Amino acid sequence: MTKQEIFDSIKGKVIVSCQAVPGEPLYVEEKSIMYLMARAAKRAGTPMIRTSSIRDVVAIKEETGLPVIGLIKINYPGFESFITPTMKEVDELAEVGSDIIALDCTDMKRGDGKSIEEFMTEVRKKYPDQILMADISTYEEGVRAWKLGMDLVGTTMSGYTPYSVKLNGPDYELVKRLAETVDIPVIGEGRVHSPEDAVKMLEAGAFAVVVGGAITRPMEIATRFIKAVENRE
Ligand SMILES: CC(=O)N[C@H](C=O)[C@@H](O)[C@H](O)[C@H](O)COP(=O)(O)O
């Protein structure tokens, strides 16, 4: 699919994030099962899946035939960035045909001595035609990613960098400010817990919304119920 076709297909829609990394209840060592989550999301009508790891990008594309936002979560010593932090992960994701590659474009520490500007520039140069999504945590990071040629910007990291605002719900304000400034799609992502939140993200100016845990992390969903009942008057 071309960039325009992908953008047309996701505009005003919910992209479902299907992720399970080691340590999470739905992570199965022998064989990923996240393609089943993606199957459910497809049947529900999502136009696109966001997922982590090579095996899940491959399995989910094969299962659903939908375009995929691929990322690799990895913790390197000396790095605070953990979403597609180096060219190695970008290469691997490109190799398996990730329709969009998501990468950390925050100011968090990088252990390779490169600034995030240098990294973004290198990736853009090596992959001029690859659709790139910048995962950011602040307005300034989003504007910079846009200026450095990223194709989409997502509020994924708001609340997950040491210096960004910590909210219980989505960062509508960040979506709004970015949407008023940049001329690339702003993806509203992070802590979208309900259908109402998803609608509010779009009303704030998001081009599309990514919903993860509220759909595909049963432990997170169960915990919310259990805590609500425990905390009743
Ligand atoms: C911060 C971080 O590592 N975010 C990850 C990025 O891909 C995922 O773990 C999230 O599930 C995704 O961003 C969707 O957000 P939520 O699950 O809150 O709907």
Image: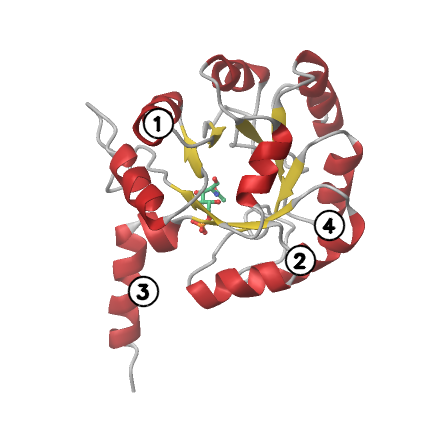
Marks 4/2: CA distance? 14 Å
Say few, some or many: other residues with alpha carbon within 10 Å of mark 4 (under 14 / 14 to 19 / 20 or more). Answer: many
Marks 1/3: CA distance? 26 Å
Marks 3/2: CA distance? 27 Å
Name the amino acid, label 4. Tyr
Q: Is residue 56 above or below residue 218?
A: above
| Circle nearer the N terminus (3, 2) | 2
Mark seen at residue 46? none
Residue at x-position 70% and y-position 20%: 124
Residue 172 in sight in this render:
yes
Which-is-in-front pick, marks 1 and 2?
Answer: 2
Q: Is residue 56 above or below residue 221?
A: above
Name the amino acid, label 1. Asp
Marks 4/1: CA distance? 30 Å
Which residue is disc 4 drawn over? 139
Which residue is disc 3 drawn over? 224
Name the amino acid, label 2. Gly
Q: Secondary structure at mark 2?
A: loop
Which residue is disc 2 drawn over? 205
